[in-house]
Image: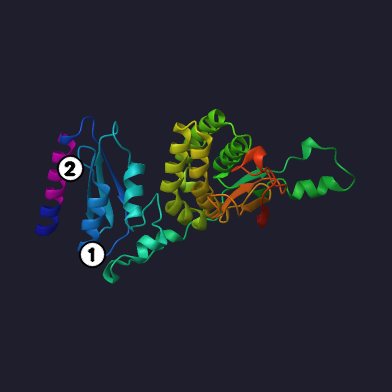
């Protein structure tokens, strides 16, 4: 009992000290998976940031106390850093690669991976919207409280739509428009709600997010279409890996040009099977072929 009271007192003291460091500090507790003292050190180090946030993780309860300056960071950003270090939590799953790189004693039971499948919504059946056919009244009476579950397209669909718009601007060799659409893609990437992704999307998103944002940022700040195309090569590679995990609204065509990228070849994704090459535009508009169809 004494040791428990001492621990509680120490935690309260640490929280008070941390709060004093930050203007308008906020403190929240969240569950973070882990096993040992080494986990504790990594979780706290990865989540904490000078003048922004301090994380204190308790191995017994698996609860992390997060104190942060909301003007400089957020709980979401802190938990994402912890996940990138290999530790699942209430908001983010760690990439498999990060988890596998943990020491054997740190590889905890991944209970957070039992996430729900893709997002669904329930739509009440409404018989008043259409005329009833003979014999349907009794059927409606027995189904009055029934619901229909509808699987929605991936929460990443706005990202994909922004990517396709950017691709079209590069097909037209329009650097100014590509820069504008690069900014739109960047906004869509930063607006992704991780909690709505299913397991497979979540894991790939954690691997690809940083690179996608970096490439979108570069494209948005450039007006030289050739330089934009250089970043579009790696952007497309990561976008392909992400789309393969998603439920897409319509088929997507993964296409390849063997001459792009100084003869090394380069890929892109399109909503149409016809080839419109974003790396050459009107110079060689139809150079390339579809190599895979994603559905």
Q: Residue at x 62, y 53 (%)?
A: 256
- Which of the pair 159/155 is nearer the observer? 159
**Residue that label 2 marks:** 15
- Which of the pair 93/84 is nearer the observer? 84
Q: Is residue 152 visible?
A: no
**Residue that label 1 marks:** 36
The magenta segment is 8-20
Q: In which quadrant is the C terminus drawn? A: bottom right
How many discs appear? 2
Residue 62 is left or right of residue 226, and the answer is left
Position of residue 291 measured from the top left corner of the image (x, y, whole percent):
66, 58
> Residue 70 is drawn in which quadrant?
top left
Position of residue 178 measured from the top left corner of the image (x, y, whole percent):
55, 33
Position of residue 38 measured from the top left corner of the image (x, y, whole percent):
21, 62
Sooner in the amino-acid sequence: mark 1 or mark 2: 2
Q: Secondary structure at mark 2?
A: helix
Magenta stretch encompasses residue 14:
yes
Q: Residue at x 52, y 44 (%)?
A: 232
Q: Is residue 231 visible?
A: yes
Q: Which mark is residue 222?
A: none
> How far apart are the two marked residues, 1 and 2, measured between alpha carbons?
22 Å
Q: Residue at x 67, y 45 (%)?
A: 271
* Of labels 1 and 2, the one closer to you: 1
Residue 261 is left or right of residue 146, and the answer is left
Main SS type for the magenta part?
helix
Q: Secondary structure at mark 1?
A: loop
Residue 86 is left or right of residue 141, and the answer is left
């Amino acid at each position: 009992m004494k040791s428990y009271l001492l621990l509680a007192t120490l935690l309260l003291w640490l929280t008070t000290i941390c709060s004093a460091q930050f203007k308008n500090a906020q403190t929240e507790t969240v569950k973070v998976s882990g096993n040992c003292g080494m986990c504790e050190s990594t979780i706290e180090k990865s989540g904490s940031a000078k003048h922004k946030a301090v994380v204190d993780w308790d191995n017994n309860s698996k609860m992390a106390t997060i104190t942060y300056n909301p003007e400089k960071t957020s709980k979401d950003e802190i938990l994402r850093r912890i996940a990138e270090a290999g530790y699942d939590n209430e908001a983010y799953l760690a990439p498999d690669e990060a988890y596998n790189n943990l020491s054997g004693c740190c590889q905890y039971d991944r209970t957070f991976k039992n996430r729900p499948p893709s997002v669904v919504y329930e739509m009440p059946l409404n018989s008043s919207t259409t005329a009833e056919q003979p014999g349907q009244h009794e059927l409606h009476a027995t189904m009055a409280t029934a619901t229909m579950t509808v699987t929605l397209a991936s929460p990443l669909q706005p990202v994909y739509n922004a990517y396709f718009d950017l691709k079209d601007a590069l097909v037209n060799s329009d650097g100014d428009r590509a820069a504008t659409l690069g900014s739109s893609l960047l906004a869509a990437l930063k607006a992704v709600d991780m909690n709505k992704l299913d397991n497979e999307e979540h894991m790939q998103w954690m691997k690809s997010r940083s690179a996608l944002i970096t490439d979108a940022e570069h494209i948005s700040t450039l007006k030289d279409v050739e330089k934009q195309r250089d970043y579009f090569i790696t952007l497309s590679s990561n976008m392909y890996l992400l789309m393969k995990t998603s439920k897409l609204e319509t088929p997507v065509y993964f296409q390849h040009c063997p001459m792009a990228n100084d003869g090394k070849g380069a890929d892109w994704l399109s909503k149409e099977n016809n080839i419109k090459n974003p790396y050459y535009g009107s110079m060689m508009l139809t150079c390339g072929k579809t190599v895979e169809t994603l559905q």
